[in-house]
Amino acid sequence: METPNIPTKPKGHGILIAVIAVVVVVVLVASFIGLDYNNLFHPKPAAQTIFVYSGPAGPANADHLLGGCVVAEMKNGSTPMASAQLIAFLLNPAVQKSFGSATGFIPVDTGAFNTTPSSTIPTIYSASNASVTVYYYTSLTESDFNYVSSEMSTFMSMYPNIHVKTSFISASKIVSQFQTQLAAKSHENIVTTIDNIDVGTLFYDGYLANLTSMAPTITAGAGTISSVTGLNNYEVKVFGGVYFMTQLVNIPLVWINYSAMQKAGISSPPTTDAQLMSDAKTLYNYYGVGMVNFQGHGGASTPTELYQWMVQFGGNPMVFNDTGDIAAMEYLYNLSAYFSPDYPASYWDTYTGLASNTYTIMDYQWPGSVNLTTLAMKPYNSTDTVLNASFNALSTGVFIRDPVAWLSQWQFYMDAAWTSIIEDHSSYSSIPTILSTENAALWSYLNTTYSPAVGMQYEIGDYQPVVT
């Protein structure tokens, strides 16, 4: 544990660097592959190098938090095999690659990263079976309407006895639809692509079909990334079965203005949290201002980033105050002395300060939120891409937040802990107490809103990250 630094509001001004950016993707061990070293270490005048990579590994693990969508099926459907056929289509490598190109989400199948991915889909609902209708609810945005509709048309041409009716509705409305259908004892066949957090309400309220026996058939011939397969396996352990399958993901990466790091005398990106702290100090001393940015906007943004940090420190962020949780917050307390002044307003779509170097490091930003055109960024070559950086991060290991229905309440308390510890600069020694206070607050909420049994489950750690 480091000697605590007392966070202060840094003074000074960032250095404005105009320019053309080049993305250089580096692997976790920070080895530069296939790069022009002359341009890396001796950049041309007025040129700026910005790269993206998996980020420093935590002291406990290098697993990354998964965002994005899962696919699931409503229970009691009259023709579950037809629904399973649609799910198999959505998880096919060729379709995964197409979805990735169209929506920006990262495929979960290794075959999707091939130049020509397999388009072979296991036959689950035979062409000789009766005609049936499957309702497909998706929480993808309306901007994806034309693309998704075309994919459903392709599906129906392949399976003319399965008619798909597609609805673009919000995650909350998908939940309402499931509730309404099951309350009416409906046997309609419903498949949904829904945010991985919102699926929790569907699972915990008992609305989802158990896909455990069908999962191997659904993914037959597909090359699901091993860490994602592990996630499905762990789902069986945590939830008693496979009730949803990871379909499209977003994974947080670290973005760095490499030219600005070079000017400060740093020649490689940090691969450990100790190195990140050291580089943060170096950047602060060189520029006279904090140069590490963090999602400190609050709402769902800050707790989401803290979730990743706590898990990488070996903690269980659901309970706030286990040993790993405390260690993570103590580290971030020290690091916050070198935060960019931008951090309190930074959110999921904050990244443009990299180009002007109001901060040099954007810690854990979702690729789907970053518009490379805005930064005048382009890949260094055909292999140095955000997609490959995401694939590297996926391959090291992944986890999802336990999709409990009360996650928004957890976020509220985690945000309060962050505000007290980091923004209000409470004392370093008070960190365990603050986190324990939020633990007690959520425990009380669950006792009152749900039941003492749920509160007890929470307190003994039954709710935890779903980790591979």
Image (spheres, rainbow, N blue to C red):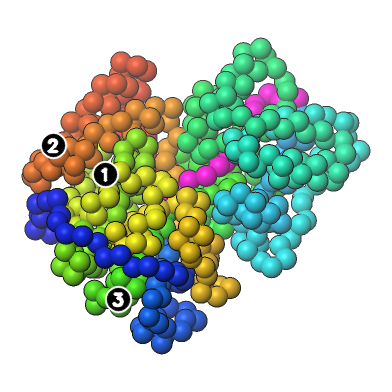
Callout 1: SS: helix
Crowding at mark 3 (Cα within 10 Å: few <14, some 14-19, many 20+):
some
Q: Residue at the spot x=42%, y=47% of the render?
A: 349
Identify the element where label 3 is drawn: helix
What residue do we see at 74% from left, 40% from top? 149
| Image position, residue 193 (x, y; %) | 61, 37
Residue type at mark 3 is Gln
Using the image as rendered, state which of residue 242 and residue 165 is in the foreground.
165
Determine the image quadrant of residue 272. bottom left
Q: Is residue 162 left or right of residue 181?
A: right
Query: Where does the magenta region start and end?
Result: 65-78
* Label 2 packing within 10 angstroms: few (<14), some (14-19), many (20+): few
Q: Which residue is mark 3?
A: 262
Which mark is nearer the camera, 1 or 2? 1
Provide the residue designation for mark 2.
Answer: 433
**Label 1 is placed on what type of residue?**
Pro
Q: Earlier in the sequence, mark 3 or mark 1?
A: 3
Residue 344: give its label: 1
The residue lying at 42 percent from left, 41 percent from top is 401
Comes first in the chain, label 2 or label 3: 3
Taking 136 as reference, is 280 left or right?
A: left
Reply above or below: 138 against 5: above
Is residue 238 in view?
yes
> Of helix, strand and loop, which one carries label 2?
helix
- C-alpha distance separating marks 1 and 2: 23 Å
| Quadrant of res 190 | top right
| Mark 2 vs mark 3, CA separation in Å | 40 Å
Tag nearer the camera, 2 or 3: 3
